[in-house]
Image: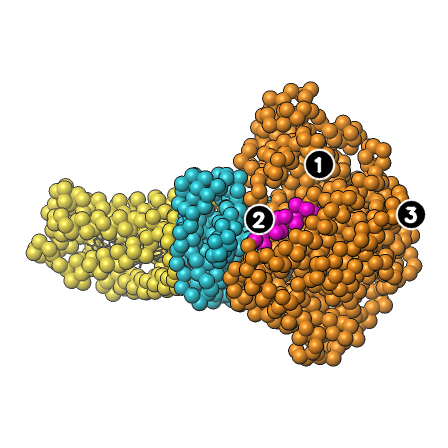
Chain colours: A orange, B yellow, C cyan
Amino acid sequence: MTDMPDTTLTPEPSHDAPGAHGDDAVGYYRPGDPVADAKAPDGPVADRWNTRKFEARLVNPSNRRKLDVIIIGTGLAGGAAAATLGEAGYNVKSFCYQDSPRRAHSIAAQGGINAAKNYKEDGDSVYRLFYDTVKGGDYRSRESNVYRLSEVSANIIDQCVAQGVPFAREYGGLLDNRSFGGVQVSRTFYARGQTGQQLLIGAYQAMERQVAAGTVEQYTRHEMLELIVADGRARGIIARDMVTGEIQTHLADVVVLASGGYGNVFYLSTNAMGSNVTASWRAHRKGAYFANPCYTQIHPTCIPVSGAHQSKLTLMSESLRNDGRIWVPKNKADCDKDPRTIPEEDRDYYLERIYPSFGNLVPRDIASRGAKNVCDEGRGVGPEVDGVRRGVYLDFKDSIGRLGEDAVREKYGNLFDMYLRITGENPYEVPMRIYPAVHYTMGGLWVDYDLQSSIPGLFVAGEANFSDHGANRLGASALMQGLADGYFVLPQTIRDYLADGPFEKIAEDHPSVVEAKKSVEDRVAHFLSTNGTRSVDSYHRELGNIMWEYCGMERTADGLKKAIDLIRSLREDFWRNVKVLGTADSLNQSLEKAGRVADFFELGELMCIDALNRRESCGGHFRAESQTEDGEALRHDDHFAYVAAWEFAGDGELPVLHKEDLVYTAIEMKQRSYK
Amino acid sequence: MAASGLLFIAFVLMHMYGNLKAFGGHDTYNAYAEHLRTFGEPILPREGLLWILRVALIAALVLHVYSAFALWHRSAKARTTKYVMKKNLASSLSSRTMRWGGVTILLFVVWHLINFTIGKVNVSGGSTNDPYNLLVDSFNSWWLTVIYLVAMLALGMHLQHGVWSAAQTLGLTNNARARRNAKSLGWILAVVIAGGFSLVPIFVLAGVISK
Amino acid sequence: MKLTLKIWRQPDAASKGAMHTYEVDEVTGDMSFLEMLDVLNEQLNVKGEDPVAFDSDCREGICGTCGLMINGQAHGPEVTTTCQLHMRSFNDGDEIVIEPWRSDAFPVIKDLVVDRGAFDRIIQAGGFISVNTGSAPEAHSVPVPREDATRAFDAATCIGCGACVAACPNGSAVLFMGAKITHLGELPQGQPERDDRVVSMVAQHDHEGFGGCTNIGECVAACPKEIPFDVISRLNWDLHQAMRHGH
Ligand SMILES: Cc1cc2nc3c(=O)[nH]c(=O)nc-3n(C[C@H](O)[C@H](O)[C@H](O)COP(=O)(O)OP(=O)(O)OC[C@H]3O[C@@H](n4cnc5c(N)ncnc54)[C@H](O)[C@@H]3O)c2cc1C
Ligand code: HEM
Ligand code: HEM
Ligand code: SF4
Ligand code: F3S
Ligand code: FES
């Protein structure tokens, strides 16, 4: 057996009684030196991006052709970067695991994209978008990055419109927008419920144009399985051609990861089946710090799990909460009754009861936790899965009565149809059932202001990095970030890095290349020769259950420790007992999954350790030990106003925690309240 | 394809109208046949118009058949492995039988020309130099009438899809209403042309039109 | 529910394939069609047989990755994607025939997985608006009448799944191509390249080996996104215009 990580390690759990803000994770990690974002210029936050752009060195157009750029991912971030760097004249190689770049998971985003255009003259501005995003992230994001994001947001809309993205328009022919996610201004641009699709198609087409022009070479059905770091710089990747099974070496002057989020560590999530952490995790193992892995966003309005066969969860637009009322029966005995027969006085409209001023419109994390609590009490509805009913009603009866069925159909028709298709129940007649599901991961590879990771020459963009959303992402801001990174930030900052290039060519027999390639080949060989008894999926599902149970909507020190133990033993079993059929030299979907699940095990453990370390509640991270008297999230800015950047120290070694202090110069930290 | 098809439609419309003159009796019909040949004289030589028409028709036919076979060849190459099971959901029988329908029409035209124009075959053994009599003699034979009626069915189907298809090919059907209109026109032309042609043989066989 | 599945198995592009018969049990109406196949694969895995390869990613009807010929219908009996088709559309005891998209322009890679790279190449031929990053004018400088925007949008919802090709008796991809031409052609931004676009995309389409359209309409019936027939007419119109303009 070759590359199997050593799993024998059982660190001593912490015995020193953690104080109010004590560190529960003592014994699970080693403290390291603090890190700092070295690249953000000083000075007023509003000037930093201009300063940085100006300071970034230039690359002579005739030199660009000699510079090779590898981009992993063709979502909004990767697709936009490939198009832009291709236009600039670099030699771009673009990779994705799907059969076409157009299928990256950005395609699934529904709601919209924020931009500080202030077309409605409702008081919006770059500063306000910046402010809302930092506050939405519960003051755990980096101020300079978020400001830049707000600054370039308006250019994104211009760019996309010019590409032909069919945003919603008003009768006058100008762009429409709406308010989204609890902010008070109208700045969300949308294309029906398919904003992500339309934006991605725009980026995809821009990229295909470069493919035709010969500046971008497109590698579809290619999965990056290892990063090549030579002489301290990221210099390439090892990829597997998923059709032929060939293990290929691709070398370059700079590598960009835009490989998306890792929500699939939970097995069930709103992510695509193939979404994975492998690209990021392989880079992490090669020295890139992983920041805030425990920050996950759980979306309150998804269609509940219907049985053990479930493979993914489907999001229903949050806008449903504008008109639907959320409730569960007051009595457990009523939970399996036809909801229409339960009288008003026996219903508990728990969000309206607990949060009288915001009611059903409380932020995502609060709505999600509310649903979990009532289901944990045994008052959930819908089918029992593993002995528990996990679902709450989202009832449109009142709005249908008030507005009429036609008006409701007009607003939500396509969502209702989708619900009917998936569940077989007609939401015009019976209340919908919803339940929270994992939706987005705010954590990711640590990057500086230039979006460069702790490995020189490795840049990270989109959901794969950690930088802009803090502990909670506001609606409609991931699309904004992906495109900001890809179109406007990376092309500027990579330029500065490449001004030192082209770097000395490295040969295919360079020890780093040989080692990287061999480790991939060994891993493939290991999976195919283990010949155990359990399918990859069954491990993934079990890992997901552990993560959801203990590192999901509510986390406790005991639960997290238990989860770490469970993950470790499951992982050990996985390496010994997994069954992967088929061959290495053809399309082999089980083999692909095995590699991804192997990395999810390691990530899952780090997520738990990170969650254990952060004994505060902030954004999507809720530690039961840190709540106010009435059960609200309680931040501890004095102790935890930092980014947790984790360093991989080797198999069997404790991860090393580097802290980056979050300094706010343009904003004052406040406690959120939605009562 | 569409241009040649449209020319065919114009021709068959005219031709059908001409055929209906058979209801006017021997002299009306023969006068019409003669008129066809003398039309435009003396600017055009005898049969001048007819030859212009013939040349145009032959050119169109060559083009039409060539494109038909080219299309046929392309679709055959586009799917060399057939489905084990394939259902048709929205398409008409006519649309799916354009090629065999076309071949049927082609065979028919060949026979038809031998019958009436080039070869002048009188199946009843009668004279061939009097167009009206040749017509009546021919359709007094039941089996020839059946051949004609089958061909008219093929023509009707070819037109029913062909008219709509031509409109679509020319890019004239950019909304649902235009599409509906093109489809209706297809039906109307199919019924009028195939039906109109069929009247003469049927009425001959029934003895209403006779020498 | 108990079902009999007849599935096309083909180890790789070079091998010859054949239909194989499998039984699956304990299928429930709540399962999606692909989850039903997951159940089959779990069974096969236990038995040591190679699981059936099929494509899917988002499993919510938007990425266009999935696509199977189910009982002779592209994406099965409902107007939706294969991943959004649920087993309640079938009955206990049914026999279901499952085949890959059949088109020589979409060669089979393995079992039910095909290569749709031809679609990317058609887009490369001209399915874009040439605008470099950063050179875009202010978004409100070009108003777009709402109707045009709506028509562009209706066409832009194409997910590139290939069901139109799979369903077309001629194996033609004009619905897919027409959708792109209509999307870009309805917008003011798309005008400058309108002639070039249609000419090069059609040339690429033919070059890829897709069949010619004879307006049969099976594609429209199979399309999960209900791309309207108009787009084909629009494509033809644009092509004639381009030819008139001397292309
Ligand atoms: C259902 C849903 C709805 C959403 N709605 C909204 C919304 O309304 N507004 C909003 O702002 N955000 C929304 N989001 C979030 C947003 O869509 C994503 O965060 C964002 O699109 C991520 O873009 P990305 O470019 O970083 O990655 P992705 O689009 O996920 O792309 C990842 C790319 O990396 C490639 N890749 C991954 N691993 C490898 C590997 N190992 N080798 C090779 N290639 C690899 C993939 O092939 C893919 O091309 C939503 C998310 C979901 C799931
Ligand atoms: C001689 C043998 C013929 C053959 C082999 C033939 C074959 C075909 C084929 C394969 C098509 C393409 C299908 C389509 O576009 O839908 C077609 C179209 C058509 N045919 Fe024919 N056909 C023949 C004769 C005729 C005749 C005699 C007429 C008219 C009287 C005719 C009228 C049309 C029309 C109007 C179209 C539609 C053109 C378009 O879609 O652009 N065809 N034919
Ligand atoms: C029942 C229907 C039809 C009858 C009774 C009929 C009768 C005739 C007759 C009598 C002639 C000879 C005319 C003359 O030489 O003056 C003729 C010629 C011709 N017919 Fe028909 N016809 C019929 C249908 C068709 C159809 C359906 C087609 C084509 C699709 C067709 C194509 C022609 C052609 C091409 C000629 C030759 C014209 C020429 O002299 O160049 N006919 N037909
Ligand atoms: S037109 Fe319809 S069927 Fe064809 S690729 Fe697009 S969505 Fe799929
Ligand atoms: S089914 Fe085929 S023939 Fe044309 S109208 Fe559709 S592409
Ligand atoms: S898997 Fe994405 S559309 Fe079906």
- Under 8 Å from ligand 1: the CB of mark 1? no
Decide: is A351 above or below A231: above
Label placed on residue C59: 2
Classify mark 2: helix, strand or loop. loop
| The magenta segment | A534-547
For the stretch drawn in magenta, the main secondary structure is: helix
- Label 2 vs label 1: CA separation? 25 Å
Depth order, front residue of A460/B180: A460
Image point (69%, 49%), residue name: A566
**Mark 2 surroundings: few (<14), some (14-19) or many (≥20) residues within 10 A:** many
Residue pointed to by mark 3: A638
Instruction: Decide which of A224, A157 is in the foreground and name it.
Output: A224
Horizontal side of C169 relative to A234 (left or right) equals left
Instruction: Specify the subunit that label 2 lies on.
Output: C
Distance (Cα) linking label 3 and label 2: 43 Å
Name the residue carrying label 1. A372
Q: Residue drawn at (56%, 32%), measured in percent from left and top?
A: A426
